[in-house]
Image (spheres, rainbow, N blue to C red):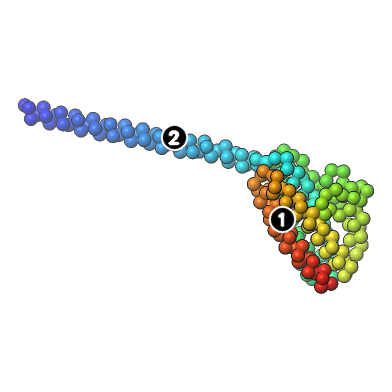
């Protein structure tokens, strides 16, 4: 009898131990699931913030200023395809257009996501991206008179004028991009600013070399 009771008691203890183990495992799984859920909840705001594009006023100014600045560079590059005499100038112009046109789309996308105006040109400026009096307050932007002269030029004269103007234009873009790197908040905008500084600094050197050869 004693033996039988001992066996029953051991069996009951075994069931209790197994049950306790299962309960702990279930709790553990619940905690893991909760951790995962917590991780998801923790990352969700970051993803939402990234999607919304955490930014400041400098980021907006950078995009709204650089869009028309790029648009003018693209316009100048398009002129070079039919008016330049140098194959090197035409190649440079092609690369400028290829790089800056997609950047215009990128910056326009940021402004739309932020609920900001996407400029076709700077406020108070005509379609060429400069003031009605032919001047511009933006670094490196050409005035109406400059753009008209470039449009009327051709051959070697165009090459020289294009390179001279584009060097000044690039220097202005580098200044704007440097300000964005220093004061901006939006990560992608600061990255683009860094890319602009790197690429256009190299192109400035290339254009100076081409001017020296002409």
Q: CA distance from mark 2 to mark 1?
A: 44 Å
Query: Is residue 18 rendered to the left or right of residue 147?
Result: left
Q: Which residue is mark 1?
A: 196
| Quarter where residue 170 is shown | bottom right
Label 1: how many Cα within 10 Å (few below 14, some 14–19, many 20+): many
Q: Position of residue 131 (x, y in %)?
A: 89, 47
- Residue drawn 70% across the image and 52% down it: 193
- Residue drawn 36% across the image and 35% down it: 28
Q: Which mark is residue 34?
A: 2
Q: Nearer the viewer, mark 2 or mark 1?
A: 1
Mark yes or no: residue 156 visible.
Answer: yes
Q: Is residue 1 above or below residue 121?
A: above
Furthest toward the bottom, the residue is 213
Q: Position of residue 83 (x, y in %)?
A: 86, 66
The one nearer the camera, 73 or 174, is: 174
Query: Is residue 183 rendered to the left or right of residue 148?
Result: left
Q: Position of residue 146 (x, y in %)?
A: 90, 57
Element type at mark 2: helix
- Residue drawn 50% across the image and 38% down it: 40
Query: Is residue 162 rendered to the left or right of residue 197?
Result: right
Q: Is residue 42 above or below residue 162?
A: above
Mark closest to the chain's N terminus, 2 or 1 = 2
Element type at mark 1: helix
Q: Is residue 50 above or below residue 160?
A: above
The N terminus - image quarter: top left
Furthest toward the front, the residue is 182
Q: Badges 2 and 1: C-beta atoms under 8 Å apart?
A: no
| Quarter where residue 140 is shown | bottom right
Q: Which mark is residue 158?
A: none
Mark yes or no: residue 126 visible.
Answer: no
- Residue drawn 90% across the image and 53% down it: 144
Label 2: how many Cα within 10 Å (few below 14, some 14–19, many 20+): few
């Amino acid at each position: 009898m004693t033996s039988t009771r001992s066996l029953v008691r051991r069996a009951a203890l075994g069931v209790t131990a197994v049950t306790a183990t299962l309960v702990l495992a279930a709790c553990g799984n619940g905690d893991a699931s909760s951790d995962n859920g917590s991780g998801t909840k923790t990352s969700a705001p970051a993803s939402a913030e990234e999607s919304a594009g955490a930014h400041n006023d400098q980021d907006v100014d950078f995009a709204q200023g650089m869009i028309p600045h790029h648009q003018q560079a693209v316009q100048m590059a398009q002129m070079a395809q039919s008016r330049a005499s140098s194959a090197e100038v035409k190649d440079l112009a092609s690369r400028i257009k290829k790089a800056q046109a997609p950047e215009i789309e990128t910056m326009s996308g940021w402004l739309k996501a932020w609920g900001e105006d996407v400029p076709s040109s700077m406020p108070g400026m005509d379609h060429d991206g400069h003031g009605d009096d032919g001047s511009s307050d933006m670094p490196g932007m050409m005035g109406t008179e400059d753009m008209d002269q470039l449009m009327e030029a051709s051959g070697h004269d165009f090459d020289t004028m294009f390179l001279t103007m584009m060097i000044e234009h690039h220097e202005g873009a580098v200044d704007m991009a440097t300000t964005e790197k220093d004061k901006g908040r939006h990560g992608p905008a600061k990255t683009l600013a860094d890319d602009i500084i790197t690429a256009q600094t190299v192109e400035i050197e290339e254009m100076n070399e081409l001017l020296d050869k002409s």
